[in-house]
Amino acid sequence: MAKVRTNTKGPSEEGSFDYDEFEKEAISRFKEGAGLVGSDGVLTGLIQRLVNAALGGEMNAHLKEERAASADTKSDQEQRLVGQRQGPAQATVP
């Protein structure tokens, strides 16, 4: 496998993940008796990276939806005449 550049960042990594190096290190650690998960697990860092990327993507999608809903609400405003002592005035209401 080749080196793949990603937009996610791990705790000590700067945006790229070398799958070849990960594979070599994982096999070596398995031969030494390391577990899959846990504080020193072979897959722990990768799992953390994937979960962080998923949560970041979910948050971005949520914020985009929220902005779009806010923009829709603003475009649905209408002008109304409001009576007052000095005469009618226009007000914008959602």
Image (cartoon, rainbow, N blue to C red):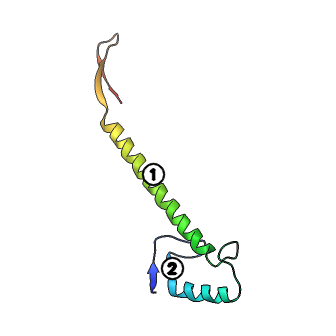
Residue 49 in the figure: left or right of residue 42? left
Residue type at mark 2? Answer: Phe
Are there few (<14), some (14-19), or many (20+) residues within 10 Å of tag 1?
few
Q: Residue at x 49, y 55 (%)?
A: 59
Q: Is residue 4 above or below residue 91?
A: below
Q: Give percent across and percent down for residue 52.
A: 55, 65
Q: Amino acid at mark 1?
A: His
Residue under the image location 35 percent in, 43 percent down:
71
Question: Considering only vertical position in the picture, is 78 above or below 71?
Answer: above
At a point 45% along the width and 51% down the height, the residue shown is: 62
Indicate the quadrant containing the C terminus: top left, top right, bottom left or bottom right: top left
Which residue is labeled 1 in the image? Answer: 62
In the image, residue 54 above or below residue 11: above
Q: Which residue is mark 2?
A: 17
> Which of 57 and 91 lies nearest the eye of the viewer?
57
User: Residue 89 or 21: which is nearer the viewer?
Assistant: 21
In this orientation, which residue lies closer to the viewer: 14 or 25?
25
Would residue 15 appear left or right of 25 to someone viewing this image?
left
Compared with residue 24, is residue 71 higher up or lower down, i.e. above or below? above
Please name the residue shown 51% across and 79% down the image: 17
Disc 1/disc 2 C-alpha distance (Å) = 27 Å
Q: Earlier in the sequence, mark 1 or mark 2?
A: 2
The residue nearer to you, when weighing 7 against 19, is 19
* Residue 78 percent across, percent down from the top left: 29, 29
Q: Image check: 8 left or right of 80?
A: right
| Residue 21 rendering spot, x and y as whole percentages | 55, 87
